Amino acid sequence: MHVAQKWEPVWDNDMHRDPHNIARLAGGCFALYEDDMIKNEKATIFHAEQSPLKVTLLVFSGASIMCVACAVDPLRAANRIAGETLFDFKLVSVTGEAPVTTCGLPIAVSGRFDATDTTDVLIVVAGFGTQNYATSALLAGLRRAARSARACGGVEAGTWLVARAGLLEGRSATTHWEDMEDFSSAFPGVDVRPDRYIIDGPVFTTGGASPTLDLMLHLIRTRLGMAVALDVASAFIYDQARVATDAQPLVSLGRLDGYDPRLAQAIRLMEAHVDQPLTIEAIAKRAGVTARTLESIFRKSIGETPGAYYLRLRLGAARRLVVDTRVAMADIAGRTGFSSAAAFSRAFSRAFGEAPVRLRRG
C-alpha cells in the first residue's frame, strides 16, 4: 500500500470534533492532518498497530549525532511512556565498529549490518562522505534488506545511499537543503522536493535532524495514538511539529530574529547570489544604506566586513561541494562565483589551509 502523507497545523479550539487530527500542547498547537493516497504496495507502517515494530538503524561515520538521536530517542521515549516495547530498535554499522559522528562522539552499535536479518524498518543515517560508502556490496545489501522490510528510508545524507541503491527511482524524496541541487542532478529519476520529510509508499526520506523528529512523532501518532505522540513531544519540550511539506528553511543570520533588518537583508542577498556575486555597493543600495554604513553594520554585528562575510559564505558552499560531491573543481569555481579554478583554489587554500584538490583526496 502506497501512502503519501502530510501533516498540517489545525488552529481549532473544538478538541472533540476530530481528536485524531487535533490536539493542543502546552498553550501551543501540535496538530496533524493526514491525507492518504492508496496504491498497490506494501502495507504501510503508518497506521494503528500494537504489535512491536522491529527497527534497524544503519549508522555511518560522518553522520550527525542529532540525526541519530532524533531517529532513535523518540522510539525509546515512546516505549517508556507506553510501558512496553512497541519499537524494538537496534543500531548497526557496516563494519560492526562504532561509527564516529561529526562531533567526534562514537555511536555504540549492536553489530554489523546483515541484509538477511529480519526487520520491519531499515533507516539509513549518514552525513559527510557517503560517496566513500556506496560500494556495490552495500547497495546490494540495502536492496535485499528493503525487499524483505515493510519500509526503509534515509535520514539526511542517508537519502543518497538509498537513492544509489535504486530504491527512490520514480518516487518523491528529499534530502538536506545543502545537497538538494546536486541530488537532483545525480538522480533525475527522483522527484526531489524541498520538503522536511516525505513518505512515498514504503520509502521515506528526511532533510535533517528536526524533520526526522517530526517523522518519528508521526510514526508514533499513527501507530499508538495522539496522546502518546504528545507525551513524547512533551518529553523533549518540542511543541513545534511542522507540516511535512514545509520547505526546509535556510537558517542563517539573514533569517534569525534579533539582528538589524538591514544586515538580514544584505545576507539574504548574498545567499541568493553565491554563483554570481553582487558588488557590496549593489547590496548596500538594495538594503537601503550606503556601502560605508553597511560595513559599519557588519563590523558591529558580526565583527567582519561585508566582503569578508560574503567570501566566507561562498567558500563554505564550495567546501561542501568539494567534500561531499565529485563535481569538477572548475564547476565548483563557477557555482560559487570565482572567475577561474585557479582563483578559486587560491582563495580556498588561504581560507582552509589546503588546496581543494588535496582536501578531496584526503
Image (cartoon, rainbow, N blue to C red):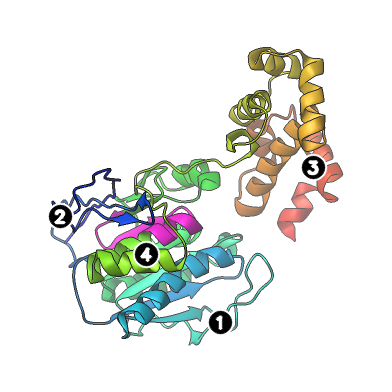
Residue at 42% x, 42% y: name it. Answer: 194
Foreground: disc 1 or disc 4? 4
| Mark before the other along the chain sequence, 4 or 2 | 2
Callout 2 amino acid = His
Mark 4 = which residue?
A: 216
Q: Quadrant of the N terminus?
A: bottom left
Report the side of 199 relative to 324 (left or right): left
Say how many tags the image has.
4
* Structural crowding at the residue carrying mark 3, measured as other residues with C-alpha within 10 Å and reported as few (<14), some (14–19) or many (≥20): many
| Mark before the other along the chain sequence, 3 or 2 | 2
Secondary structure type for disc 3 = helix
Mark 3 = which residue?
A: 348
| Mark before the other along the chain sequence, 4 or 3 | 4
Note whether 357 is above or below 150 in the view shown. above
**Magenta stretch?**
199-214
Note whether 286 is above or below 88 in the view shown. above
Mark 1 = which residue?
A: 95
Secondary structure type for disc 1 = loop
Image location (x, y in percent) of residue 298: 77, 29
* Structural crowding at the residue carrying mark 1, measured as other residues with C-alpha within 10 Å and reported as few (<14), some (14–19) or many (≥20): few
Residue at 68% x, 12% y: name it. Answer: 285
- For the question of whether residue 345 can be seen, the reply is yes
Residue at 65% x, 43% y: name it. Answer: 328
